[in-house]
Image: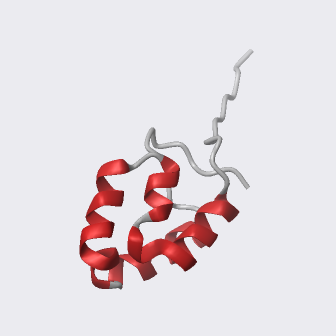
Amino acid sequence: MSVYVTYTSDKSKIVALLLCIFGGFLGLHHFYVGKIFMGIIYLLTGGIFGIGWIIDIIRICLGSFKDNVGAPLRQ
């Protein structure tokens, strides 16, 4: 008998998306999922000059954005 285990983050995909849309240039979505270092980088560079901000919106929508331990965000 095999057991299939899947895990997801306790962080919400919708909350991360809203934080990214309205505060992505400040890195709020990175702080939310526990990526403090990347949050500081986004805060100091304006969302890595706006390009990283747009890429993160797309990554969150596609489901490839993960939390600080590598778990996918929950729906």
Instruction: From this view, report whether residue 32 is shown above or below residue 62.
Output: above
Q: Quadrant of the N terminus?
A: top right
> Horizontally, is 34 left or right of 18 in the view?
left
Q: Is residue 66 visible?
A: no
**Which residue occupies 31% across, 78% down?**
46
**Which residue occupies 69% across, 50% down?**
74
Nearest the viewer among 74 and 37 is: 37
Q: Is residue 23 visible?
A: yes
> Horizontally, is 54 left or right of 72 in the view?
left
Q: Quadrant of the C terminus?
A: bottom right
Q: In which image quadrant can residue 42 be found?
A: bottom left
**Which residue occupies 70% across, 19% down?**
2
Nearest the viewer among 38 and 57 is: 38
Instruction: From this view, report whether residue 59 is shown above or below residue 64.
Output: below
Q: In which image quadrant can residue 55 be found?
A: bottom left
> Horizontally, is 29 left or right of 14 in the view?
left
Marker count (numbered): 0
Which percent across, then down, holds residue 12?
A: 67, 53
Which percent across, then down, holds residue 54?
A: 44, 82
- In this view, which residue lies farthest toward the top? 1
**Which residue occupies 45% across, 54% down?**
31
Nearest the viewer among 53 and 55 is: 53
Which percent across, then down, holds residue 49?
A: 28, 83
Nearest the viewer among 12 and 40 is: 40
Which percent across, then down, holds residue 29?
A: 50, 62
Colour scheme of this structure image? secondary structure
